[in-house]
Image (cartoon, rainbow, N blue to C red):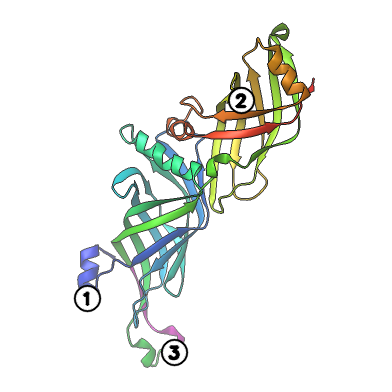
Amino acid sequence: MTETYEQSKSRWGFDVNLVRKVNYEDLEFDFTGPNHFLTPVTSTKVAIELIPLPGFHYPVVQARGKANIVINKSTPAASVDTAWEPASMKGSNVQTTFTRTDMATTEEKLADYSTFLSGLILNTSYTYDLIGTTDVITRLSIPGAYMLPYGDSAPTKDITISGIGVSTTITLGGFEGFKALEVVGLPTLQKTGGGSGFTLTLNLNIKSPSPQLTMRFGDVTFQVVNAAGVAVGTILLRDWTVRPGDDNPVTAVLTGDGGSAEIVSTLTTAGDKLTLSGFKGSSKNLGLAGALAGVKIDLSIPAAKEA
């Protein structure tokens, strides 16, 4: 049996806009696919807090949702549309998941989408709005049935209620601009092009400050300037993923533009302090590239050994 929001409101005699809050205990974004307008997202634990209604039993056994991600209180940046997933209830709290859904944007919204992603990447925390509807399958017990001689087999009925309004604010922990990125061990420098250029191979790690976010970035490139303000080249972080926790290793290769013996000498004798900056070519994913353009990372490099 399927009811619309208005039908359910009329049937039960109250407004069924029951969603008070939505929290993601984990949330993964995958930017490695070929379509930069569709980003797969998953969550293994979504907590939905419903408005408690005394005397009314409405355990939710399945849920799905369709919503816009809204930034700055008024600007839709992307949308999500989840499939039916199993759900369970404890009190007025629903626990569910979404195994995979596409976060979709458009070319017209791409700049706003980049703003949303940069909010998650650059800040300690980021707040946005989720506005849309959810559909639920509820297992309803008949009011007052506990007073009748049914025992544990009191009658229930599964009803699909569609179009329940959702308008909630969500705050997620961010990556703080990757300021915790650090070098592990000693870099290796190899001269190239007959000595006119070089590559510097580094093992990096970041202790993620976000307790919820995982982002699979794929290959990411930053422009590099040394402590003297001289452009050194670009650094490629290969197949980069940042997830909650202290262990997020990645191999990076800095390719020198060549020509400066002084740059190489500094890197191999004293080390250097490099600044990594995002730019419009930081990622093949256009929405992500726009977000990474605001990144600036200070990275202390110990003296490298020559290969």
In which quadrant of the rendered view does residue 75 lie?
A: top left
Q: State the mark number for residue 13.
A: 1
**Residue 148 seen anywhere in this rendered image of the structure:** no
Alpha-carbon span between mark 2 and mark 3: 69 Å
Element class at badge 2? strand
In which quadrant of the rendered view does residue 36 lie?
A: top left
What's drawn in magenta, residue-wise? Answer: 152-159
Q: Label 2, on which residue?
A: 235
Alpha-carbon span between mark 3 and mark 1: 28 Å
Q: Label 3, on which residue?
A: 151
- Would you say residue 140 sits in the magenta stretch? no
Q: Nearer the viewer, mark 2 or mark 1?
A: 2
Q: Nearer the viewer, mark 2 or mark 3?
A: 2
In the displayed structure, would residue 37 be above or below residue 269? below
Label 3 is placed on what type of residue?
A: Gly
In which quadrant of the rendered view does residue 264 lie?
A: top right
Name the residue: 35% across, 65% down.
Answer: 19
Name the residue: 58% across, 34% down.
Answer: 297
Q: Nearer the viewer, mark 3 or mark 1?
A: 1
